Image (cartoon, rainbow, N blue to C red):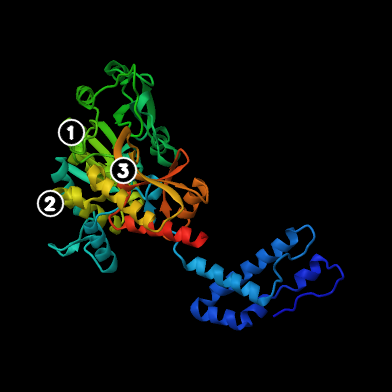
Amino acid sequence: MVAKLTSMKPLSKQDYLRKIPSVDELLRAPDIQELCARFPRAAVTSTVQRVLAETRRTLLARADGAPGDGDFSLQDIQQQVAAHLQKTCKPSLQRVINATGVVIHTNLGRAPLAEHALRLVAETASRYSNLEFDLERGERGSRYVHVREILQQITGAQDAFVVNNNAAAVLLCLSTLARGREVIISRGELIEIGGSFRIPEVMEQSGAQLREVGTTNRTHLGDYRQAITEHTALILKVHPSNYQLVGFTADVSLRDLKQLGTEFHLPVMFDMGSGNLIPPQQFGLQDEPTVQEAVNQGADIITFSGDKLVGGPQAGIILGETGVIAAIARNPLTRALRIDKLTLAALEATLRLYSCDPDCFRHIPVLSMLSVAENTLKKCARTIVRALKKHAVPMDIAVVQDSSKIGGGSYPLHDLPTWAVSLAPKTMSPQDLERKLRTGTPPVIVRINRERVIIDTRTLFPEEAGMVAKAIIALFAQTA
């Protein structure tokens, strides 16, 4: 170990820099040699170099050049190298407990997968599969056949195709049907989707030309009719699933647009966004179009997400007439946008639950969370409160009625009645408690309302109530 400086003579930054061990010196140290046995030597070397560079930058940034609390010894830097390597090997993507009450939480991975989907994903990932192999004929097949028939059965569509997300589905359809030509769309449907992506920008990338009609709040059938020219390739309707216009409004139904399209021999496309496969009345929700209704109303092309309300993995589902789907499948963009085998496995397993499982509400997490009884939520909240009071955590604790959100750009005006645990810590601020829970193991994501931390039980899995209670108890045990 490098000895600490004992001279009373002021030292320059260069004096301190010379005390920092070299890369070779560190790599010969016994503790670093142990790390080389546990991690690839190249990773250890690069980490040593990174830690030394950071140490030098920190020293040079100080006004007086003094090392402060650190003495830049071998031991000090070895500990930093070990900590960096441990952090590097820990997955960045990790499980969190969603106690926010937002069921389809975009930032927390949207829809959790059903157990059936997880099993098929694991089996498909760990072994070979018939991804693109026709077992009947013994020759190359298509990956899309694994979900085509089940989508036809569930929705009543003539044909189906899938890509990696719904924005890609919209891009691919517009590129196939309207590249270099005009697409008519209402100004009130020029929405922005997640990540600041906007429908006009997606249309521009497809090569289609945007033709806006109507106004922000009112569009009539005559507006579409007047906009049709020899350059028109497609009529596009976009369901505003992430917002609603109220008041003095008017829009045109899909059925009326289909009649107009038939009159002028133009295809009509409906981008549903979230996409309901089950009538929302079964959840006690407001009226929203279902995919089956859109098919029955004659839309030539329908696009929607595989996650969100469907409850599967992120995917873009395209339904339509056989000839149109065949043209889309031939587009060279399909190679860049194609769905991978793990997503395909998860999507197939989720869709088969809709088709084959009368109890799919219980087995698809999103549907289960949307339909859970209020009494069940109240019992869960009371379980957490009992555990916290038993350990006398220094907080004001209460079971309260609250409201949850569906999330994922779905039902923006609809709240779900819920029961939650309300916490007012006495030894720290609500913001501190939120941060400590968020950065704990496992991270617990909560929300703050009126200076109280809210734990919404709607989005907790059955085993997570106990985990949340233990996380809070452990947190206050550490600060006692």
Quadrant of the rendered image containing residue 15: bottom right
Residue 356 circle label: 2
Can the viewer see residue 111 in this picture?
Answer: no
**Sequence-wise, which precedes: disc 1 or disc 2?**
1
Residue located at (30% from left, 53% from top):
383
Q: Is residue 262 above or below residue 376?
A: above
Q: Which residue is mark 3?
A: 419
Q: Is residue 365 above or below residue 470?
A: above
Badge 3: few (under 14), some or many (20 or more) residues near its Cα, within 10 Å? many
Residue located at (27% from left, 55% from top):
462
- Amino acid type for the residue under numbered disc 2: Cys
Cβ atoms under marks 1 and 3 closer than 8 Å:
no
Badge 2: few (under 14), some or many (20 or more) residues near its Cα, within 10 Å? few
The front one of 377 and 102 is 377
Left or right for 19, reference 96 = right
Residue 293 circle label: 1
Badge 1: few (under 14), some or many (20 or more) residues near its Cα, within 10 Å? some
Residue 225 spot, x, y in % from top left: 28, 18
- Amino acid type for the residue under numbered disc 3: Trp
Residue 316 spot, x, y in % from top left: 30, 45
Separation of marks 1 and 2 at Cα, in angstroms: 21 Å
